[in-house]
Image (tube, rainbow, N blue to C red):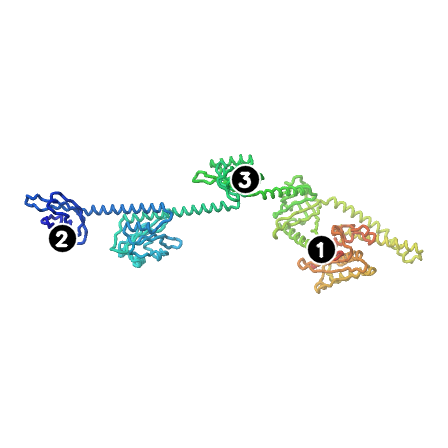
Amino acid sequence: MDAQGQICQQNQTLSQILGHQLPLLRFENLEPEAVLREQEWEQCYQRADGSLVWVQLNLSSFPKQGELGGCFLAIVQDISDRKRAELRLQQQLNFETALARFSSSLTTNDAVDWNSLLGLIGRSIKGSRVYLNRFDWSSRTGCWMAEWVDEQTPSFFEQAQRIVIDDLPWWLEQLQRNQDVAIGHLEELPPQANAERSLLRQTGETSLLEVPIWSRQRELWGCLGVSILHGPPRDWSDEEARLLRVVGEIIYNYCDRRRVEQALRDSEERFRVTFEQAAVGLAQLDFQGNFLRVNHRYCTLLGYEPEELLQMNIGDILGHDDWVESLERLQDMQLGKLETYCKEKRQRRRDGSLRWAQVTGQVVFEGTKPKYIICAAADIHDRKQYQSALERLRHRYELILNAAGEGICEINLRQQIAFCNPTAAKMLGSDHVAQIIGLSIHEIIEPLLPENRESLGSSSWQEVWESQVSELQLSAAAGTPPSIHQGQFRRLDGGTFPVDYICTPIVLNGQHLGAVLTFNDISDRLAIEKLKNEFLSMVSHELRTPLTPMQVALGLLDSGKLGPLSEKAQHLVSIALSNTNRLRRLIDDLLDFQRLESGRVQLNCQQHRLLDLLQQSLETMRAMADPDQICLELAPLSETLEELQLWVDGDLLIQVLTNLLSNAIKFSPVGGVVTLAVEAWPKSEEICIRVGDRGRGIPVNCLELIFDPFHQVDASDSRQKGGTGLGLTICRRIVEQHQGHIWAENRPDGGTQISLTLPWQR
């Protein structure tokens, strides 16, 4: 080269480095004083084809005395590869610097400025837009979480809030296959990526690089992308893709950490709210029993302030034995031998009183190591008081049942005896209650079994209960006690004995739960009644035989057919005849009663018009009512009742009605009114006949006793009013033989009313 920089001579290698059209080589200084030293520098030249080449120039001068004096020797060395390597190293350094800054920002900041963080990535790789896309697989949409754009690029953030990912199938497939979506130019897209090509044209992007972001569960969490909107198409390097993947992983870790931290904060807040607002007392204890934390309810339970309890140990509120036992459980929990502990304890309040609590302890672990204990204390003091009262009441009822003179059994739905008192067990032939419990009712109770036991189905007791329920409802409606039934019960040794029993169903909300059977051994009573009936029968017949001629003779004397008598003799004969007639009525009542009791009376039931029976009874008793001017009234009847036909024994029913009318007339004042009324009961298909008077009434405690044999409310009534005390007893037996009921009650406006029911069908 000459001093003006013109190339005088060159080799072939220089043309290969700089091109066939050599550019003008420029040098900093070709002054004579500078040629004495060697110079070296790096310089970039543009070839004729537009490409750039980096070279290292080494310039030295030839000696002035020689042929080439004043010329220069330039050695040109191609260093483009080295410069590109240095550029890549610099880019990698920039990437790593940006990555470090990005990671540090996510680690140290609670509130992330996504725009600034994504800007670090965008500027380091010279992108126009950087965006973070989060997938929602429930709605199969993508939503941009953040976006950064340079000054020349418009934002696409608002339009990218709900991108239907199924509309971009090729792009989604690439990400799901864990492949980078690297698009240097739109023409590189395959034919099946029409939707993706259309979207890129819409956004104005010429180059795009997207990398998938995966969750720890290996689910596609989202993607991170960078795009170019200005300048020529760009080939994306592996280093850039690797940077985006690392950044995506950092972003996911940050978001997941934030999610876990938020879940932890939410959990801690829920625990705090639950702890403070719990309906039971809660306390946090260490393994020595010291209080670490208490809620308001626990403080209220013990009467302490929170600050006071936090200075105390659980042993300060427990008795000595409970504290020793609790300390052992705490040590077992600390050693991992026990995780949960529950027991009822009495805790000492601040005022010194003791209060029952249900205490439950639960170990809380940190990893596998026991950390502390959560203790829950539920106030059960009132419940314990109730339990104690119920236990005392149960014991009292047990004593009553054990001391009761009647046998009492509970029958379950399986028709087995579930409970019996000692009296019942003894009556059934056992000294031990356990021998009776569990036995089938069919093995014990004879009256429920017909002569052919095989014909009785398993529903027999259900039918009995339903009939008893019906009877109890009727009794309640009428204000009368339930009926007592008689039957034969069987002992364990096979023997039988007669009983009076009441079977009361146990009904809850209309559902049968079982029954209570109360019974009493009436063997002795029946034996006495048998002797009494035999005696009455004998006496009645023995008295009736001589009484008939006496009555005839006195009648003849009283009538004067045997001649006139003196006034005194006539008076004595009249008294004798009256007493004889009374004795005859007594004997007749005794015989009727004896026949009814022995079951020798057979009903001769036929169809009878109800109105005819009522009128005949009234007409029969008018002769008795007229002397005292007592009015006998029949209450108006409906057309249905007037034509009603009853299937009854007419003579016996008239006997009942005349007996009731007779009693009403006897106890009515002069000029009083006796009423005979009839009422229909459609539900039970019965009629109710009522006989009422305006007399003095009957004491409440005697309303049921008046139906007992020979019972008189006032002993003087037998002398003043006449009667044997058997009339109402005979009425009850006749009504019961007709499957009816009879009872007495006092009327609110004074007087007595006796009612009886009869079925109106066969």
Quarter of the picture holding the C terminus: bottom right
Q: Is residue 383 above or below residue 547?
A: above
The residue where tag 2 is placed is 21
N-terminal of the two: label 1 or label 3? 3
Q: Is residue 287 shown left or right of residue 624? A: left
Amino acid tagged 3? Lys
Marks 1 and 3: which is nearer the front?
Answer: 3
Task: Measure the alpha-carbon separation of dots 1 and 2.
Answer: 141 Å
**Element at badge 2?**
loop
- Say whether marks 2 and 3 touch (CB < 8 Å): no
Residue shown at the point (68%, 44%) measured from the top left = 407
The answer to which quarter of the image holds residue 420 is top right
Q: Amino acid at mark 1?
A: Gly
What SS does tag 3 mark? strand
- Nearest the viewer among 49 and 591 is 49
Find disc 1 in the rendering and name its residue. Answer: 740
Is residue 231 something one can see in this rendering? Answer: yes
Residue 753 in the image, given as x and y percentages of width and height: 74, 56
Q: Position of residue 675 (x, y in %)?
A: 76, 60
- Residue 494 circle label: none
Give coordinates of residue 594: x percent, y percent: 78, 50
Q: Which residue is mark 3?
A: 343
